[in-house]
């Protein structure tokens, strides 16, 4: 995607389809990232905000609520065993999960503000952060 082009609503649909089709067919996280990289404009959080909305919808669909919460402990190990998260990268993933939960509850996360400092405070040293189009 050219640097000056803003993502369109069709780009959001395409990103959602890539992610959901990949999840349905057990596509690995790195292959999904390779498919999504062309949709990620430089210095932009897209398609991260699309994925947060999808994650919030998934929490809603699964019935997650205050009386019936989802366990965060061990989530990285259960769902992303192929990725080694260390240091700040653990916090990035935690932010993404908590931002989805916040959106599920009605609060809009400020992805651009949150992710801006990620680029200046970390070198992207883990396999997942090196390949991630959204750094999250």
Image: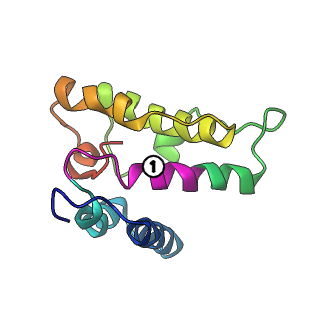
Q: Is residue 86 visible?
A: no
Q: Secondary structure at mark 1?
A: helix
Q: Residue at x 47, y 73 (%)?
A: 17
When the figure is inspected, residue 12 is found, relative to residue 54, above or below; the finding is below
Q: Nearer the viewer, residue 6 or 37?
A: 6
Is 13 magenta? The answer is: no
Give the image location of residue 97, x and y in percent: 52, 39
**Is 71 situated left or right of 35 in this image?**
right
**Is 131 situated left or right of 55 in this image?**
left
Q: Residue at x 78, y 50 (%)?
A: 63
Q: How many marks?
A: 1
Residue stretch in magenta: 42-55
**Is 107 situated left or right of 12 in this image?**
right
Q: Is residue 69 visible?
A: yes
Q: Residue at x 22, y 44 (%)?
A: 43
Q: Residues within 10 Å of mark 1 (few under 14, many from 20)?
A: many
The C terminus sits in image quarter: top left
Q: Residue at x 46, y 32 (%)?
A: 95
Give the image location of residue 114, x and y in percent: 37, 29
Give the image location of residue 76, x and y in percent: 47, 41
Residue position marked by numbered label 1 in the rendering: 49
Q: Which quadrant of the figure has residue 135?
A: top left
When the figure is inspected, residue 36 is found, relative to residue 59, above or below; the finding is below
Q: Nearer the viewer, residue 126 or 32?
A: 32
The N terminus sits in image quarter: bottom left
Q: Which quadrant of the figure has residue 6?
A: bottom left
Q: Nearer the viewer, residue 51 or 41?
A: 41
Q: How is the image coloured?
A: rainbow
When the figure is inspected, residue 28 is found, relative to residue 136, above or below; the finding is below
Give the image location of residue 12, x and y in percent: 43, 65
């Amino acid at each position: 995607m050219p640097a000056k082009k803003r993502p369109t609503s069709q780009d959001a649909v395409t990103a959602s389809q890539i992610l959901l089709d990949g999840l349905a067919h057990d596509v690995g996280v790195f292959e999904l990232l390779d498919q999504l990289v062309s949709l990620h404009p430089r210095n932009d959080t897209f398609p991260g905000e699309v994925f947060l909305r999808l994650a919030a919808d998934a929490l809603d669909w699964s019935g997650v609520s205050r009386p019936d919460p989802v366990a965060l402990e061990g989530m990285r190990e259960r769902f992303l065993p192929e990725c080694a998260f260390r240091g700040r990268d653990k916090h990035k993933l935690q932010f993404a999960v908590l931002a989805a939960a916040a959106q599920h509850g009605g609060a809009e996360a400020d992805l651009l503000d949150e992710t801006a400092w990620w680029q200046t405070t970390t070198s992207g040293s883990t396999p997942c952060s090196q390949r991630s189009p959204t750094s999250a």
